[in-house]
Amino acid sequence: MKKVLNYQLSTMWSYYVAIIACYFFVIVLGGFIFFVSAGSSNGQSSGLEMMAFIMAFVVFVSGYGENARFAMQNGSTRKAVFQATMLNLVINCAGLSLVTQIGTLINGVVSQSGGTLFAGLSTLVYGVDQGLTAAIFTNFVFTFAVMAASGIFGIFLAVIFARLGKNGRVILAICVPVFIFVVLPIIISYLAMNAPDFMLGVAEFLHTVLGLKSGNPFIGSLSFMIGAAIVGILAYLVNRKMEIK
Amino acid sequence: MSSIKIEGVGKNYGSTRALSDINLTFEPDKIYGLLGRNGAGKTTLLNIINNRIFADEGNVSMDGKTVAENEEAQSKFYFVGEKMLFPDSMKVNKAIKWTGQFYPDFDLDYALKLAELFELPLKKKISGLSTGYKSIIKNILALSVNTPYVFLDEPVLGLDANHRELFYKMLIQKFSEKPAAYIISTHLIEEVTNIIEDVVIIKKGQIIKNESKDSLLSQGYSVSGAAAKVDAYIQGRTVIGMDNLGGLKSAYILGERQADADSELEFSSLDLQKLFIQLTNI
Amino acid sequence: MELNQDKPIFQQIAETIEDGIITGSFGEEEQIPSITDFSVMYKINPATANKGINLLVDEEIVYKKRGVGMFVAAGAVKRLKEKRQTQFYEAYISRLIKEAKKLNISSVDIIAMIERGYDNE
């Protein structure tokens, strides 16, 4: 398992470079533009984190298959590959979250002299006071939790993908985006119209579970992590019977 | 080092029975020839042993423990199949490096020496190599990992004559200096006849022959001559095949050769490829 | 140094070495190529090469020195020539006569041919 993890980690550094470069670019550019225009805005943009979430998803969905096959070529078992992938997810989400916090901090310093202020995600969502050092920890945990959830979702898709045959993969690749962007909104609006109580109940549930009701980002983090764990278990079960033909 | 025991293995693909009741043992430090026609089931069997796919029935074990999803067992095998499992962007030198990371007994110097001998470009992406060079990188890794069991599926696919000869020579030298079990699955029976010690023949998912090459070939002989004489001779004998050329005939017989029964008939030993063709026709 | 189909390979290996010894290519008490060398040269399984060499070891034509290699035994040339002389009839004469009979060549003709050959070659 260690050997697989070692290999997987070695493939991640290029992503780190890419992300740091993006952050740097956005922070510097954002700061520069607003400095020049002599305005300042308490930016509501959470662009930094959004980028990282998408990165996490893409990295894990695309890298998983290739790395898993190569590891199995070299005598690893599916179980060892999966365990290494999980550890890899945790390590990298923690790392990316840390990088994000540092980026936000730097942005905070830079924007003192005018420029876009990127608020930490937990500030935006929960209203956590940006100034406190505790906010950094809160941000770190929450960002980590959302990234982990995003990454595990990518892994889950990748594992299903690996198990399907050629036709199945094409169908999946079409159906998933269609479902998320077309079918789901339709279902939601239909339910909103015809079963408003049910939708209210769902909204209530989500508010509580995500800690929005109590304004506690840690509850939200926990929910994301539990969700990630559940998806992780599902992914493990699907992965058990994967065949490389 | 223990043997690999394959017991009652069966595999279905939909309604096709790809493998059925395979019982086989691979012992250490021998060169095996795994022979069979296209689609006979050789690759399926190799995939099962090497934890790529799962058997529907039966078990493959080593030291009494199943080898599927067993890291200790799988670390003793190395399998190069037709499918390339290297990441698309991986370059040859990285593939060598990382394979070495996974296998503690990997001989890096030897791998690099072979790469030079075969003129393998180290900085090129594996996905960009020709079929022949894809086989070459796989073979180099197989010869360098130093695992007790090495499985080679069509190792000389795409190789030109010079590289084929070089490969066989490197394999023999390696085997002689550092014995290990090599299981070679191939169509090129003539080329490997002298290299293999044991023969396993698979026909339509079942094993029809599993013994040493010497014993297999000593089980029969061929007799040739005038058609009428040959026809007379083969009466009461087990004939597994015949060739006709006008008035000349050759018959392939299972059984013990009588010492030159007739001076007008020519007797000679079976060769493995001819025997294989006769056994696997229909 | 080509292998053929008629005789078992290990026997052909043994005979090749014997030829080398008789002609002096492998001198007595000199080292002969290793099993690996023979296997690679002929592209055969080392076990086969080993079998052939063991034939010679049994006949005391060749001996193995542990950790060093294989050597031609003293007196091997003499022993080989004697062995081959004994086998000469079976190896050559028998076949010659069989073929001659097929072609209706008499023993008198054969003797004449042999004498001619000794004069010319």
Image: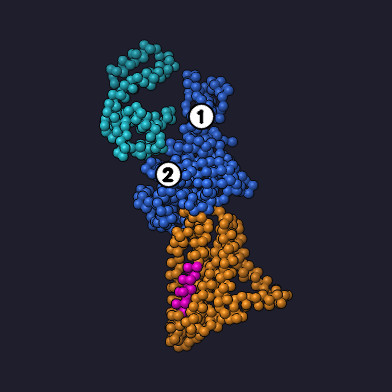
**Which numbered marker is on residue C78?**
none
Q: Colour of chain B?
A: blue
Q: Which residue is mark 2?
A: B180
Q: Chain of mark 2?
A: B
Q: Is residue B121 above or below residue A129?
A: above
In this orientation, which residue lies closer to the viewer: B38 or B35?
B35
Give x and y (percent) for residue A170: 59, 60
Q: Amino acid at mark 2?
A: Ala
User: Quick one: which residue is furthest to the bottom in this view?
Assistant: A38
The residue drawn where x is 53% and y is 78% is A121
| Residue A168, quarter of the rendered image | bottom right
Residue at image mark 1 = B219
Relative to residue B71, is residue C81 drawn left or right? left
Please state the extent of the stretch shown in magenta in the rendering.
Answer: A90-104
Disc 1 to disc 2, C-alpha distance: 28 Å
- x 27%, y 26%: residue: C75
Rendered-image quadrant of the C terminus of chain C = top left
Residue A73: x and y in percent read 48, 53
Please check the rendered image and state whether residue B129 is part of the magenta-colored stretch, yes or no.
Answer: no
Tell me what hue chain A is rendered in.
orange
